[in-house]
Image: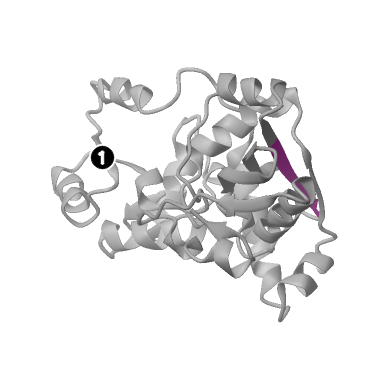
Amino acid sequence: LCSRNESEYIDEAFASLDMPLRKEHFICTRINRRDKASNLKEIAAKLNLCLDSFVFVDDSDYEIGLIQALLPEVETVKADYPDLSSMDKLKRLFHSQPLQDINRTQLYREQKEREKAKRQFSTVEEYNQSLDTHYTCAIATADQATRIAELSQRTNQCNLSGARYTKEQIESFLSCGEYGILSLAVTDTYGDMGLVGAAVVRLAEKQAVIEGFFLSCRVFDRGFEVVLLDRIKEMVAGKALSGIYLPNEKNRRYCHFYEDNGVACL
């Protein structure tokens, strides 16, 4: 929720208006007199999301123009109440089929609690231990194909090759002997985070190539990328291992990941 207003007016609106959305549905708010572009950048940083993941809806031509000028990667929609034809554009921006049945508001609320707790510890290992973190990193199963495909399509910052897969492609890889697919699922004190990482590895007699490697931004800085890579090394033991990295603006933080972990970079 990004509003140039006074917080008491927003509270009053939620208390008095008959709306399906309630204040508790919003995981992050910026209500002040600052410009909305600055506030939106803060929200993106707080949620650890790229700005091109956002859709900005406003009834002001000025605010729409400001976001278009300063944050062109953000999709904008002019609210046209009471006509509401803008809802058609909003619907087209999202999948017609539901992805996974995930309460994303709850996931982000849990993530905020994790970040708060993280400040008490000096290392990732101490932090993970305090959260009673458990993970499962294993050969993927057919019932995970939809989520793995979804993760590849949604992940940008830790998608080393930029690969995007469909459910049908993942199912095909799982049923042939030319590929090995790994999935990574995580739980901790705050809740079950579900499947948050996956790798697609092409297998040959003497070598293996990591064609897809992606990890949700919700588990950044917790060492899970190394967990996933180590499991790949176990799976292809005895083969020469390399990984495809195709640089772009979003994944550059991982530009040396393969090299730093002893994997040849293609």
Question: Residue 64: in sight, yes or no?
Answer: yes
Q: Image quarter for residue 259?
A: bottom right
For label 1, the crowd category at 10 Å Cα-Cα, with few meaning under 14, some 14 to 19 and many 20 or more, is many
Q: Amino acid at mark 1?
A: Thr
- For this orientation, the residue located farthest to the bottom is 122
Residue 4 within the segment the image draws in magenta: no
Query: Which x, y percent locates residue 107?
Result: 64, 46
In the picture, measured across the screen, residue 138 lies left or right of residue 62, that is: right
Q: Secondary structure at mark 1?
A: strand
Between residues 127 and 184, which one lies in front from this camera angle?
184
> Which residue does the image show at 42% across and 43% down from the upper left?
13
Q: Image quarter for residue 40?
A: bottom left
In the picture, measured across the screen, residue 238 lies left or right of residue 25, that is: right
What range is drawn magenta here? 181-188
In the picture, measured across the screen, residue 208 lies left or right of residue 127, that is: left
- Disc 1 marks which residue? 76
> Which residue does the image show at 82% across and 68% down from the upper left?
130
Between residues 67 and 202, which one lies in front from this camera angle?
202
Q: Main secondary structure of the magenta part?
A: strand
Compared to 254, does 145 lie above or below?
Answer: above
